[in-house]
Amino acid sequence: MNPVIVTIDGPSGAGKSTITKQLAAELLFTYLDTGAMYRAVGLKIHRTGTNLDDRNGLQKLLDTIDLRLVPDGDGTRVLLNNEDVSEAIRTPEMSMIASRVSADKLVREKLTLLQRNVGQKGSIVAEGRDMGTVVFPKANHKFFLDASPEERARRRQKQLAEQGQEVDYKETLEQIIKRDKDDSSRALSPLKPAEDAIIIDSSEMTIDEVVDFMVKYIQR
Ligand code: DC
């Protein structure tokens, strides 16, 4: 039987990670966090001081990168050359760096290949920005998860506080608006719903309500 592909795209803070993890657990599918992959590549580029204008250097970095996502409970650990960078990639600084490197053609080509490989191995729920539009255009079920920027900033602030990072609400909101603008206006794989995606606004919905809706939709 062919693997079943479910895609969940949408802006940051719309609840994608929590919802994708929960949905994957309910369906017994693999959870694919593609944002974590962009973050890990961003971390490597940042640490090595690679300039995105140095195309040969960047290509070499991408050819030799050892990036692995290892299932861990309902989530994933991210291993970069065997180092667990799961926490290091989650800082506000890394969010901005990941957004910047994700506009690069070589980076997107490399990660698109890695993501499709995972999708060939078994059924997945994949979260990101271009899952339904570019990486898995023939996915069996596509969702686009949205929420107001204010609600997303509140959620992001709470999530970071739970990890022990105190951030300012106004600054978080400004970063979310900037990141949305950058992610949606870039030339390559911009953030937008696939034409055949179901759009869900989660501003007024609980996580369980969204997941229930998705499960019913998939099993209908
Ligand atoms: O979902 P996230 O916040 O962890 O993603 C980090 C950055 O990576 C985000 O700014 C956009 C980018 N990204 C992307 O361009 N394409 C994806 N499929 C996933 C993430």
Image (cartoon, rainbow, N blue to C red):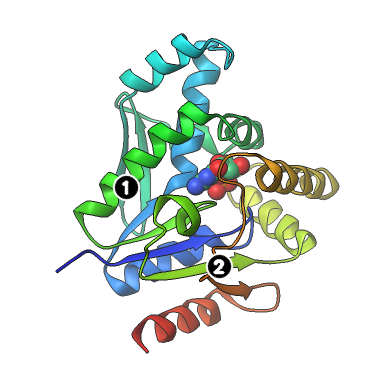
Residue drawn at 67 percent across, 53 percent down: 156
Report whether 63 appears left or right of 185: left
**Residue that mark 1 sits on:** 116
Instruction: Answer yes or no: is residue 87 visible.
Output: no
Q: Give the residue type that dot 1 points to.
A: Arg
Spot occupied by residue 102 in the image (x, y as percentages of width and height): 56, 35
Residue drawn at 65 percent across, 31 percent down: 93
Report whether 22 appears left or right of 130: left
Which image quarter holds the C terminus?
A: bottom left
Q: Give the residue type that dot 2 points to.
A: Glu
Residue drawn at 34 percent across, 33 percent down: 79
**Residue that mark 2 sits on:** 195
Instruction: Answer yes or no: is residue 55 visible.
Output: yes
Spot occupied by residue 18 in the image (x, y as percentages of width and height): 50, 62
Q: Secondary structure at mark 2?
A: loop
Instruction: Specify whether tag 1 is near ligand 1 (CB below 8 Å).
Output: no
- Closer to us: 135 or 45: 135
Q: Earlier in the sequence, mark 1 or mark 2?
A: 1
Q: Secondary structure at mark 1?
A: helix
- Closer to us: 188 or 165: 188
